[in-house]
Amino acid sequence: GQRCFGDMRSIVRRCMEEGKIKDSNLEETSQALWAGIHGLTALLITQSGFPFVERERLIKRTVDILVCGVSVDCK
């Protein structure tokens, strides 16, 4: 988990350096994105009886929302 988070944190840092992410707090942004992704994953694993929309649609929509929330280009 730490290595995966470190990889994601590096990507967030690079996006910040390139001006693609509007927040300047690397730790806060990385942890918020990680929490959102982890939350969805945990729900899909532990709540298999919940009437989720189609799995791939839900994953895509969640990632879109998370990315849009930090992106400078999102409208």
Image (spheres, helix red, strand yellow):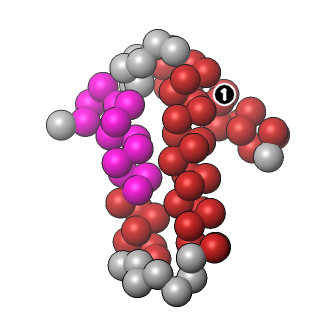
User: Which residue occupies the foreground of this view, 59 or 35?
Assistant: 35
The residue at 56%/67% (across/down) is 43
Q: Which quadrant of the view contains residue 20?
A: top left
Q: Is residue 61 above or below residue 21?
A: below
Q: Is residue 9 above or below residue 65?
A: above
Q: Is residue 69 magenta?
A: yes
Residue 66 percent across, percent down from the top left: 41, 44
Residue 65 percent across, percent down from the top left: 34, 48
Quadrant showing the C terminus: top left
Identified by mark 1, the residue type is Ser
Residue farthest left in this picture? 75
Badge 1 local density, few (<14 within 10 Å), some, or many (20+)? some
User: Which residue occupies the foreground of this view, 57 or 45?
Assistant: 45
Q: What residue is pinned by disc 1?
A: 10
Q: Is residue 25 left or right of residue 58?
A: right
The residue at 81%/40% (across/down) is 3
What residue span does the magenta drawing correspond to?
62-74
Q: Is residue 5 magenta?
A: no
The residue at 41%/24% (across/down) is 21
Residue 25 percent across, percent down from the top left: 52, 15
* Magenta part, dominant SS: helix
Q: Is residue 73 left or right of residue 42?
A: left
What secondary structure is marked by label 1?
helix
The residue at 61%/21% (across/down) is 27
Q: Is residue 49 above or below residue 74?
A: below
